[in-house]
Image: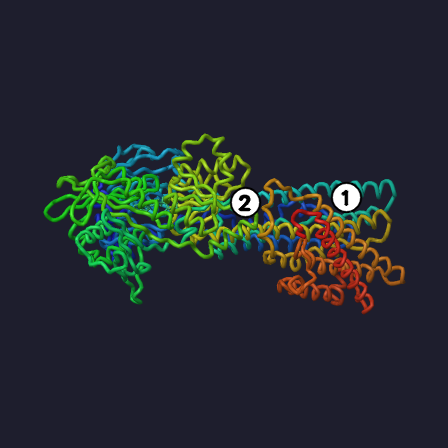
Amino acid sequence: MDTRLPVHAAPAWHSLDAQQALDTLHSNPLGLAEGEIASRRQRYGANRLPPPRRRGPLLRLLLQFHNLLLYMMIAAAAVTALLGHWVDTAVILVVVLINALIGFIQEGKAEHALDAIRDMLSLHAMVLRDGERRKIPAEHLVPGDIVALVSGDKVPADLRLLKVKNFLVEEAALTGESLPVEKSIARSAADAVLGDRRCMAYSGTLVSSGQALGLVVATGPATELGRIGSLLQQVQPLTTPLLRQIDGFSRWLSVALLILALVTFALGTLWHGQDPAQTFMMVVALTVAAIPEGLPAIMTVVLALGVQRMARQNAIVRRLPAVETLGSVTLICSDKTGTLTRNEMTVRRLVCADRVIDVSGVGYAPAGGFHLAGAPLQIDRALLDIGRAALLCNDARLEEDAAGIWQLHGAPTEGALATLALKTGLCAQETQAELPRSDTIPFESEHRFMATLHHDHSGHGLIYLKGAPERLLEMCSQQRTADADQPLDADFWRRQVTDLAAHGLRLLAIASRPADAEQRSLSFADVQQGFTLLALFGIIDPPREEAIAAVAECRSAGIAVKMITGDHVETARAIGAQLGIGIGRPALTGAEIELLDERSLRELLPGIEVFARASPEHKLRLVQAMQAGGEVVAMTGDGVNDAPALKRADVGVAMGRKGTEAAKEAAEIVLTDDNFATIAGAVQEGRAIYDNLKKFILFVLPTNGGEALIVIAAILLQLNLPLTPAQVLWINMVTSITLALALAFEPSEQGLMTRPPRPPAEPLLTGFFVWRVLLVSLLMMAGALGLFSWELQHGNSLASARTMAVNTVVMCEMFYLLNSRHIFASVLNREGLLGNPKVLLAIAVCLALQLMFTYAPFMQQVFGSSALGGGEWLRVLLAGLLLFSVAELEKALIRRFHLHPHAGG
Ligand code: ATP
């Protein structure tokens, strides 16, 4: 281990000049040697912030008791103890404990699921080691590493900048300043505050434009971000608007019940003169019966499991409320390239000033040749010139792997050009060595071109320019033929552009001009004019098959799909037509959007599905206009400048592969496969999760309702208590750990994507909900109370009558669980009855527990239950069947008479 390396008393890096900083960390501009890394990692640790401080397990367990219901139950336990009902006291306490434990375990499970998802979004960094660039997990960075940054990156560690080019960083995460700060490499004063240290880039901030090279000076907890710490302490709350609603609802219910219980107690004892001890037990039974204690906890699990399922299907949810919003999305705006198309590009056609050449071969393998009017074409100088330009004005690299497959490192558009160049017989290394690159203006969606400056060995300078043809035509004054350069015939090129684009080809033009030998850097002023247009490339990028299906599926789900692309308008329309987007409708270009005011834009929008040559600002305007028109918009994006539109959209969707960190930060959802079909899948999953939450509430509330009604009826009719508090608690516990949990694993319903989106303002407890809960509660009460009285009337003991009541409630629950698998659809079919094995398992377990409750001597002692005979079980079964049939009948009526918009026909 190198003990000379600084660890504790870190120098003020911003006040050192670049060389001093390198020296202090024993590093150099080519990066550390690979052999050096291990010892540094050992010394400095991983470049990872300690996970946000969570509450310890003990505190989390204790917090489970911090709940109005449990306070009420503990109070009830105390009073039952005072009254000498020791068994009830013990049961209540055990149930309190078990409830807390279940909550604790479920919470842990939910958090675990979300942690695993968070880890899938780990950061990568482009590092220079042994003089070679490679992409590594940001966690593996050590002080002394040299890191390359480009726009859209998140700074992976604290860096002393060594080289910058138009490098702007947004440091809001650290300083609160939202405007990007321009960085330089000159050192700052030792006492400069964080925001003024221009030569530093701090971990967690975002590069908003330009490029830089920096020396890692601090990692993990030693970074400024790590030191502030507080920022990361914020754990994402495990909640969504729906869950908050439910939480509020159950709290409200608890208070209402407490008041109801007190009033009942007062009336019973003071007015009716009943025995306070007995009345108290009734009141306790009522309260524990009616409160849906497990509801919020299990709903959290439903949500977490759903989110985990989405992650498995390549959609990572960064902010939980998005899950609910997804279910109400009415419009999806998607990028084209890579999302709707395959992003596997091949140059098909080459248009020069004097000839149109067809290119054969597919994919990135440099196999294939050139044809002129169907006849093979010999490679000549002009073609080589074009190949050279395509290879040099290019950041992509092609590599043949051991299996002989050509792998692309870089952007597919550039990969296609590199392949074309290799098809002309050029060798990448040799060409790059002959004309080394001195400087670059990288491609950005805003300016739609890229330029590179090269010098040959005799010092001649050359600038290559490639980009969207419309842009390049503005910068060119000449065109090249096989023999000579001529004045530019812009009309000819425009015709060619329209022709290629109408075939759905993606277009790129390439041009060059000489530069001075002394010129070593490129600025925008150097690429304004004077170029010679070499050729036009027509590139195919076929649509994804699954995207075609997904677009159709969205349509049937009442969701409009629009395509917003940076590509040429004709290309966009042609590809759109293949995908079923914008057929027979006009397309709008970015330039046209700029001419429209807000109102006219909003009015035009409904008729337009394809937006071309649109840049990120246009996306923002489009989202705003669509939202103003009442749409709930999901919007995709990948570039740093897409962040505002992603933030503004109801659901921002970032591309996981080609997307920048800036876009991912701004998005609610990240697609790990960049695929449009995944968005449609996520919408479906979002709808399914919401559905499951609703099913869940519809299942749980009638249990509580039924029990409460039983007790209330007994109090009103001055009957013996049909369910003791201990028995009520038993029912609640058994059903919530078996039956209710099985619903959390319910697969999504068929036909989910044929109904319209849920109105975002739709309340949870609609009239229909209240009706269904009441209906089932009443049925349950009727069954249990009926059998309870029947048992007593036939001279059986109170114990066996109560056992009947308990078993009836649970049996009804088991049947109702089957009903609840579909809110409206019938379950009277194979899928409905047997479709979810977890439901069947839960019923089996529940049955076993009930048998234990009824027959085990220990249980009989604790719960006062007693054994039942065959006839009694038959009656219990009939009660369950009755509830099942009525519930199915109700659904059938709703479907038949279209009594609910989601019920179908
Ligand atoms: P999307 O459909 O996702 O918006 P896009 O690729 O169609 O993506 P941009 O990436 O903004 O949109 O590209 C717009 C245009 O810029 C392309 O049609 C092409 O002419 C040009 N272009 C794309 N990539 C490069 C590049 N690497 N270098 C130079 N020009 C490029």
Disc 1 residue lies near ligand 1 with CB under 8 A: no
Q: Tell me where residue 202 appears, x and y as whole percent.
A: 34, 41
The answer to whether one can see residue 267 in this image is yes
The front one of 410 and 2 is 410
The front one of 220 and 788 is 788
Direction from residue 363 to residue 819 in the image, left or right: right
Q: Tell me where residue 469 appears, x and y as whole percent.
A: 30, 43
Total marks placed: 2
Residue 329 is labelled as: 2
Alpha carbons under labels 1 and 2: distance apart: 43 Å
Residue 261 is labelled as: 1
- SS at mark 2? loop
* For marks 1 and 2 on the same chain, the one whose residue lies earlier in the sequence: 1
Quadrant in which residue 837 is drawn: bottom right
Q: Which amino acid does label 2 sit on?
A: Val
Direction from residue 303 to residue 315 in the image, left or right: left
